[in-house]
């Protein structure tokens, strides 16, 4: 499948090992795409995770997060773009 025909989606990548579980991203997401999981990261926190394809790529989670680089928002991304 080429990039031209690949399905494009909105996606949020959350770096689990940088998340401190503050829930600011969860609270600001208007489509409830982010939840706090039950797993614990290396810092000892339950970390946020992206859960649904209802994301509008608004970026509110990115701006709410106090940890630089913990959240990346992809708009109309292909699987190849998200993997990089």
Image (cartoon, rainbow, N blue to C red):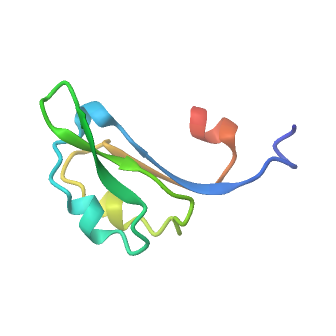
Quick check: 59 above or below 13? Answer: below
Give how far across and how far down residue 65 sits, in percent: 24, 55
Could you say which quadrant of the image residue 62 lies in?
A: bottom left
Residue at the spot 14% in from the left edge and 29% down from the top edge: 43
Quick check: 53 above or below 41? Answer: below
Give how far across and how far down residue 22 sits, in percent: 15, 53
Q: Nearer the viewer, residue 72 or 33?
A: 33
Give how far across and how far down residue 45 sits, in percent: 15, 37
Q: How many marks?
A: 0
Quadrant where the N terminus sits is top right
Could you say which quadrant of the image residue 20 lies in?
A: top left
Question: Which residue is outermost to the front?
Answer: 38
Question: Which residue is outermost to the top?
Answer: 42
Q: Is residue 64 visible?
A: no
Residue at the spot 65% in from the left edge and 56% down from the top edge: 9
Give how far across and how far down residue 27 sits, in percent: 25, 68
Q: Is residue 16 left or right of residue 81?
A: left
Q: Nearer the viewer, residue 66 or 35?
A: 35
Residue at the spot 26% in from the left edge and 30% down from the top edge: 17
Q: Is residue 11 left or right of residue 3?
A: left
Could you say which quadrant of the image residue 47 lies in?
A: top left
Quick check: 52 above or below 5? Answer: below
Residue at the spot 53% in from the left edge and 69% down from the top edge: 56
Q: Is residue 66 visible?
A: yes
Quadrant where the C terminus sits is top right
């Amino acid at each position: 499948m080429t990039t031209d025909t690949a399905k494009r989606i909105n996606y949020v990548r959350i770096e689990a090992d940088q998340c401190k579980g503050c829930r600011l991203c969860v609270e600001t997401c208007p489509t409830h795409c982010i939840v706090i999981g039950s797993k614990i990261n290396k810092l000892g926190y339950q970390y946020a995770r992206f859960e649904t394809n209802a994301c509008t790529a608004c970026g509110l989670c990115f701006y709410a997060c106090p940890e630089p680089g913990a959240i990346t928002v992809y708009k109309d991304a292909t699987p190849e773009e998200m993997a990089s």
